[in-house]
Amino acid sequence: MDTGKLYIVATPIGNLGDITLRAIETLKSVDFILCEDTRVTKKLLDHYQITVKTISYHQHSDFKKIKEIMNLLNEGKNLALVTDAGTPGISDPGNMLISDLLKNHINQIIPIPGPSAIVTALSVSGFPTDKFLFLGFPPHKNKRQKFFKEAVAYDFTVAFYESGHRIMKCLKELKEYLDPKKQLLVGRELTKQFETIYRGTIDEIMEQMKEERGEFVVIINKK
C-alpha cells in the first residue's frame, strides 16, 4: 500500500514574500503541517490564509512523536515539514525525521525548494563559491576551539551559523586563529526589516557590530 507523501517545504527566512507559489500550494493541499514552532509558522500561514492543522515537531520530539508521524503517513495522509525559517533539514532535526522514515520504508519524500540563509549570504559575499564548506553551528561549550581552528585551516570558503547572544564571543574566539588580513562577511537577520551585512577583516567587523541581536551567518573568504 502506498503511503502518504511528506513534503519538505522551504519557508521565508525573514521577508514573508520570499516563498514560492509551489510552496504555498503545497501547504494548502496537505492534511497536516509539521512545524518546528507552531507559533512562528502560524504567522506565515495566517499571512497566506492557510488553515491546515499544524503539529509540533522539533529537536526535542521523542520517538512517540515520530511514530505518530509515521502512522499518519501510513494512513495515506500527506504532510508538510517546515522549519521556523529556511529549508528544513539544514541544521535542524528534519534530517533525523527523514532518516527514520526511510529506515521504515516510507520514501515518498518530496523537496519543495526555496530560501536558505547560508546560500543567501554566499550569493552576495563576492567570495569564491565554486566550492565551499558549511559547518552548521559552532558547539555551545566543548570543542569550540577545535571548531574555529579547523574553520580557518581549509583552503576554500567556509560558512557557518551563529546565534545573536553568542556572535561576539564567536568572533573573539575566531580571531585567535584567523589571519588578521582575511576578509569576512557577517550577515545579520537576512531578508528581515533590519537586515545588515558586514564586510571586512574580523577587527573591522567587530568594531562595526559592537553588541547585536538576531541570527547570523559568518563567511570566511578562502583568499
Image: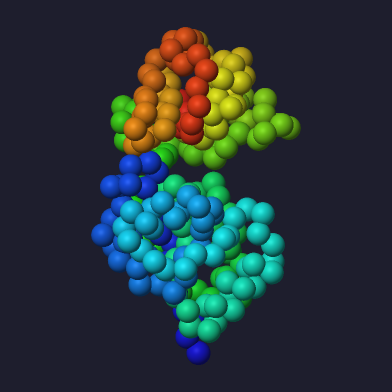
Q: Quadrant of residue 74?
A: bottom right
Residue shown at the point (52%, 18%) measured from the top left: 211
Image vertical order of residue 14 relative to residue 207, above or below: below
> x, y percentage for residue 92?
55, 50
Farthest right residue? 142
Q: Position of residue 152 (x, y in %)?
A: 54, 24
- Identify the residue at horizontal 34%, vertical 32% (top origin): 193
The quarter of the rendered structure image containing the C terminus is: top left
Q: Is residue 74 left or right of residue 16?
A: right
Q: Could you tell whether 174 is left or right of 202 in the image?
A: right
**Which residue is outermost to the bottom?**
1
Q: Residue at x 54, y 46 (%)?
A: 91
Q: Is residue 88 visible?
A: no
- Count the labels in the image: 0
Where 119 sits versus 23, above or below?
above
Whether 133 is drawn above or below 56: the answer is: above
Q: Position of residue 118 (x, y in %)?
A: 42, 39
User: Which is nearer the eye, 187 or 65?
Assistant: 65
* Image position of 139 (left or right of 22): right
Viewer-side residue, 31 vs 216: 31
Q: Residue at x 67, y 29 (%)?
A: 144
Rendering quarter of residue 23? bottom left
Q: Whole-percent x and y of residue 30?
A: 40, 72
Q: To which quarter of the image does residue 150 belong?
A: top right
The colour scheme is: rainbow
Nearer to me, 56 or 215: 56
Q: Residue 167: in sight, yes or no?
A: yes
